Amino acid sequence: MEILFSSNALIALLTLTFLEIILGIDNIVFLSIVSGKLKAEDQPKARRIGLILAMAFRIVLLFGITWVMSLKATIFDFDWGFLSGHVTGQSLIIFAGGLFLLYKSVTEIHHKLEGEEDSESGKASTSLSGAILQIALLNIVFSFDSILTAVGLVSSEPAPKGFGEAALIIMILSVVISIIIMMIFAGPVSKFVNEHPTIQILGLSFLILIGVMLLAEGSHLAHFTFFGHNEVHSIPKGYLYFAIFFSLFVEFLNMKMKKSSKKPVQLRNNTIHDEKLKDTDITN
């Protein structure tokens, strides 16, 4: 208990909690877009289940950290001349997650801009079970990425004797606290995202960036090398999150400067806009 309440432990807890919240931004964006296609009464339930799944996956992975770290072991090697690598369990999971995120993001952009109208009069365009399945699949990848980053941060810091025994408790506490904070803000964030078409498209664009980052990270973990000497490197997360926050800052400035009467573009597959259109029609 002394170690848990020491200054080193409290600093580690604050750092890891902040890190979990930052790494959870992509999770919130995905939750907002997927839940936005559900009926209004099902959206809070989908967000709660999604964040509870995120917490459960992270805690389970922390308890099975030995197994997680064992996924670094090479499954098979290959050398095709122009491309070689050492494929591991981690690289396969993260690479597959990146592909899924790219597919899902591009598909959503297509449906919102050019797809057929899938929802009418506020009717949901997807089922609650389908949304939860998508959230669960992506949470597995986000959880691996989050836990590996947290473990790397803790193991890289000098610690006093006995601190390793408390590290697991600190990481679990950081996960629980960060998920509670995200639960508090998930509703307002989702409402804001789904009410502003440009934010939705920006969010989907961010998910494309994150998908590319996961592909690069998976390739780096598998030590993919082109023509014997050009190894694939991971993309630093700092660059990615700077691009996301800067883009959001610019968009908030645009929204503040253009609070004029022009109606925003109405995206498809959005129950919030469908309900507003229905209310407008009834009023007219």
Image (cartoon, rainbow, N blue to C red):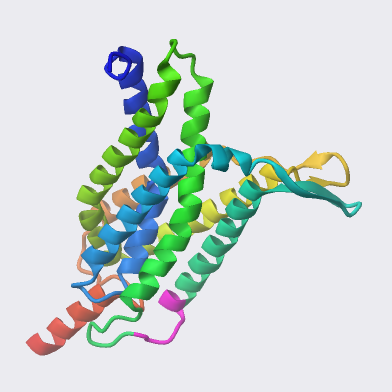
Q: Is residue 245 visible?
A: no
**Residue situated furthest right in the rendering:** 81
The vertical placement of 277 against 56, above or below, is below
Q: Check if residue 127 falls in the magenta segment.
A: no
Quadrant of the snapshot with the C terminus? bottom left
State whether the magenta stretch is mostly helix, strand or loop: loop
Q: Front-most of 68 and 238?
A: 68
Q: Front-most of 235 and 8?
A: 8
Is 79 positioned to the left or the right of 121 in the image?
A: right
**Residue situated furthest left in the rendering:** 283
> Which stretch appears magenta?
111-118
Q: Horizontal and vertical percent for residue 39? A: 24, 76
Q: Residue at x 33, y 27 (%)?
A: 13
Q: Horizontal and vertical percent for residue 121? A: 22, 87
Quarter of the rendering containing residue 131:
bottom left
Q: Residue at x 55, y 57 (%)?
A: 97
**Residue situated furthest top in the rendering:** 160
Q: Check if residue 116 falls in the magenta segment.
A: yes
The vertical placement of 99 against 84, above or below, is below
Q: Is residue 165 visible?
A: yes
Q: Residue at x 58, y 51 (%)?
A: 94
Q: Horizontal and vertical percent for residue 88? A: 69, 47
Quadrant of the snapshot with the N terminus? top left
The vertical placement of 91 against 34, above or below, is above
Q: How many marks?
A: 0
Is 213 positioned to the left or the right of 131 in the image?
A: right
Q: Front-most of 237 and 146?
A: 146
Q: Horizontal and vertical percent for residue 246? A: 41, 43
Q: Residue at x 22, y 57 (%)?
A: 187
Quarter of the rendering containing residue 103:
bottom right
